[in-house]
Each structure stands twice: as structure tokens, then as C-alpha cells.
Image (cartoon, rainbow, N blue to C red):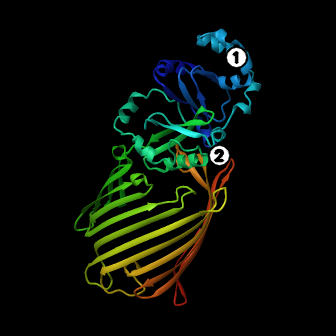
Amino acid sequence: MRQVIKNLFPLIRRLPFFVLIVGVNLSQASQPGYRSDTIFLKPGDYIIYEDSSFYAQSDTILILPDDIDYVSSADHYNQGRHIYDSISDWGGNKPWLNNLVKLMVVTGSKTEKSSKNKIRSIEQMQEHEGKKILQIKIVKIDVFGQGINDTIYLKTKKGNSLLNSTHIKTRDKVILNNLLIESGDEFNLSIIMDNERILRTLPFIDDARIVAIPVSENEVDILVITKDVYSLGAALDFNRLNSGLIRLYDLNLFGIGHRIQANILFDFNEEANWGYGGSYSSENLFGTFIKAKLSYLNAFETETFSFSAKHNFITPEIKYSYGLKQDVSYTQAEFDTAVSPYPLRFYYQDYWLGRSFQISKNRNRIILSGRYISNNIYERPEIQNREYHHLHTYSLYLASLAYSKENYYRMNLIYNYGRTEDIPHGTLWNLTAGYENNEFFQSFYSSIEVSHGRILPQKGYLYVKLGFGGFYNEHLFDRGIFQI
């Protein structure tokens, strides 16, 4: 480790700003409650941890696992400032002599590596609550090589450099558009933690960290560290041995955060063996946090145009959520009542709107929402009222009342390997009622749903969901669902 850090000195001298991320044991990182410490060193500061030491010749940020004990010059300086001030001039401008003086001022016994010197990253961030944000800086780690928590931010291997050259990193403007903060805002830890989670939910971002850098007693800079997912990909999905789908995609087209995908379909049981389609989508359209997707399919005598857009409750402070979906389809289908495949033409619409009311300081919410679904069939054969419900012409009106108590816990190795995961925990109750006006009948709908997530220390994560609902038509219960 000492030799590695020694090799960094020539690089550090050339950089005005440097980030060092020290290795994390994955077995430790997987434990519930895993945290990392963030240490900011000014030029001339040093830190000693385990069997290593580091001397900063420029502004440097270190991100250390929470279980590593360390002693920094900042700790010593705060504890014995009056002693340091009296002899600091003696060292002059010689770094090695200054370090010797600092080591002599405070002894290096293990008893001094106490929990007082181990400030968790969240507790560090809380110290900046209410401070003014001056600048927002962005550091983008290569896709192949280093990780945000699991290695040292050093020179990339030759093989990884070649692979990294085929990837276009996410543009700074795209990252800034996905932030809830900007220069001049007051530092709010809840918003910062939400913003970390929002960045990690983006399909083209593998991991993200947001760090506060103290500038003065009342001001901080914000450092956003991101690592992309490699955006180019291909996949082959089989429905059967002789039918399936080939997908070619770019998750982050030109680094602007848009996804483009081409689909090739094949089915050797059909007269026309091949088909095609594609989609184009944005996770944050024009910086509005609206997800939008446009898609097209032309295969096996079916042609479909589809458009969808939605704005979710990405944080408890968001008051409104809304969305829409529209499908226009033309196809040929076989029916029991028809001698040969019959043409179908229909138009499906789905609109919804929600309003959130925050009812406590711990961000519990009451959510009211409404939804309208319309299915218009323009061409089809004769059918009965108890068959092919998706080909009925109907309108469905829904309203719901929900109570949400939700927070997120940062963990590893629950659903994925390596990347940071934001695991929801809390409780959700949802009551829904509605009315369907069908061309054949009228029905009432009702449902109840309860879900609960909980972190079990040293054991993992438990999630339970119960739901029951259905339609009532002429004193009969049908089209129901029970889930556990």
C-alpha cells in the first residue's frame, strides 16, 4: 500500500483536485449498516490507517470503509492546536520535518484510535446542514477497472483502457439535470441522500456517491462521483426452440442518457418468419424527471405504435405524480367463432394522476390518486360477453387512497453483486375502488393491498406483500386476484 501511494505522488502534483478510494472487503460491505467515511485533506495534511500513511500535496478526498481506524493531522490539530501553533514555524517548508513534528505532538497509541476519530459519512454530512452550496463538481470513474468502494482510484490496466475507449461517459449536463440541488441552495442531507438514490436508479449509472467538501464555516462544495454501466449490448431471448427475439441496444446514446434499441423477431412456425421493431426512451426528458418511451413493432401480421410517459414520486417532497400510455394496434388473430384469422384494430389509452400530502417530519405521506383506462375496438368478429375481455370496448375509472411510510437503506449483495443497492423499508397501505362501463355489462371494483419491508440486523432483508381485489357484476365476484 505504501509503495502504491508513493507512486501516486507525481500524479497528485499535477492535479488541483484528487480523489482516493481505499479498498473495501466485500464480506464487510455486505453486512447491514455498511457505511464509508469521507475525509477531506488540504495540502500538507496527512492520514495514518492500518499499515499505511498518506500525505496530501493537493486538495484530496479519501473514502474509507467505516471499520478502518485512522488518525489524521486534522484530528491532532484540533486536539492540540495551541501546542502545534507554538512550534509549527520550526518545521519551515520541509514536509518531512513537519510530519515529524505532528507525530511528536500527539502519541500514536492504539487508545487514541477511538470512535471519536471515526465519524460516519452520514454524521459528517449532517455537520453541513443549512450551509450554502458554492460549487458542484463531478468525477466520473471508468466503467472497467475501479469501483466507487472496492478499489484504489489509480491507473487503469491496459485491457480495461481499451474497453473504456469504446464507451462514451455520461455528459456532465445529464448528471446535473438529475440533481435536486444547484449552486446557491442550502445543504439538506435528506435531499442529498435521495439524490444519491435517484442517480443509482438510472439504467446507465452503475453507482454514485455525493460528498460534501467544507469550504468555510458556512459554505460547502458538492462532489458527485459516478460510475457508468457499459452502454452497448446485445441479447438473444428464446420463446421456443424455433422462435425468439434478438435485441441490440445502447443504454446511453452519445452519453446523453437516452436509450435506443433495435429488435429482430423470428418465428419459423409463421409464414413470414421475421419481424422487426425498435424503441427510443429517455429517463429524464429535458430535465423534468419525466420518463418517456416511443416504440414500434411490425412482425407476424401485427403492427403496433406505442407511447408512454410518467413522472413518479421520486422523493416524499414531490407533490404530483402523473402518467399516460397509448397503444394503437392492428393485427390478425384466430377466434373460435371465425373460420380464418380475423383482422383486429384497437386503441388503448391509460391516464393517471396522484397527489401526495406529507403528514409528518419523518416524511410519512397520504397519497390520493385517480386513473382512467379506455379500450376502443374498431374491428373484430362477434364475441360473447364472457370471453376475450381485452377485446371489449370499455372505460374503467379508479380512485385510490394510500398511506406510505418509506425510507431507504444502503446495502450490498441483496439483489446484485458489487453495486450499491437502495433497499426500501417501511409500510404501504393502499385502498382502491372503481367502476367499469363495459359494452356488455357494468361492474364495480375494489381492492386492498398491504406491504412491509424490514431490515433484519446480521440476517438480511424481509419483504412481505398481501393483496386482494376483484370485480363485482350482478352480485357475482369475478376477475379477482389474491397475491401473497
- Which image quadrant for residue 364? bottom right
Tell me the mark number nearer the camera, choosing from 1 and 2.
1
Q: Nearer the viewer, residue 473 or 267?
A: 473
Q: Position of residue 264 (x, y in %)?
A: 28, 57
Question: Contact, CB < 8 Å: mark 1 with mark 2?
Answer: no
Q: Position of residue 402 (x, y in %)?
A: 59, 68
Tell me if 122 is positioned left or right of 58 in this view: right
User: Residue at horizontal 42%, vertical 57%?
Assistant: 291
Q: What is the quadrant of the C terminus in the image?
A: bottom right
Disc 1 versus disc 2: distance between alpha carbons? 43 Å
SS of the residue at dot 1?
Answer: helix
Q: Nearer the viewer, residue 317 or 61?
A: 317
Q: Amino acid at mark 1?
A: Asp
Q: Which residue is mark 2?
A: 32
Q: Which residue is mark 1?
A: 85
User: Residue at horizontal 67%, vertical 50%?
Assistant: 459
Q: Amino acid at mark 2?
A: Pro
